[in-house]
Amino acid sequence: MYFFIADEVQTGIARTGKLLACEWERFRPDVLILGKALSGGLYPISAVLADDDIMLTVKPGEHGSTFGREPCGRSCCHCSTGSGEG
């Protein structure tokens, strides 16, 4: 089985004129990696997006992140995206 993984750390969140650079080619990747702009430039955070059939195969402890589970990063993300108070 093969997956197409789009690394949109540099290009995602409207940096190319569309929300995601993949949208220019009308392409939907299997896995999408985002970063930088998620916190509005306030704090280094990242995200991996995929459908449940992919994400549910990853078990706790099988993945990692430099700033994973960091409360400050989570708060910055919530505030910059308007998804909560932080």
Image (cartoon, grey):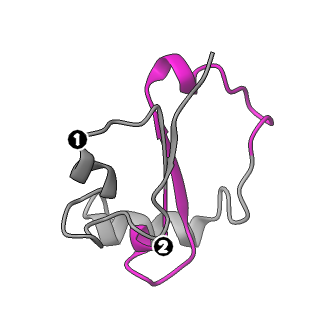
Above or below 8: residue 37: below
Closer to the N terminus: mark 2 or mark 1? 1
Q: Secondary structure at mark 2?
A: loop
- Per the image, the residue denoted by label 1 is 26
Kind of residue at disc 2: Lys
What residue does disc 2 label? 36
Q: Is residue 77 magenta?
A: no
Image coordinates for residue 14, horizontal then vertical, percent: 25, 67
Is 63 on the left-hand or right-hand side of 27? right
Marks 2 and 1 in Cβ contact (< 8 Å): no
Q: Which residue occupies 39% across, 67% down?
A: 11
User: Which segment did they paint magenta?
Assistant: 34-63
Quadrant location of residue 18? bottom left
Residue 10 versus residue 68 in the image, above or below? below
Asked if the magenta segment contains residue 56, the reply would be yes
* Quadrant where the C terminus is found in the figure: bottom left
Q: Which quadrant of the figure contains the N terminus?
A: top right
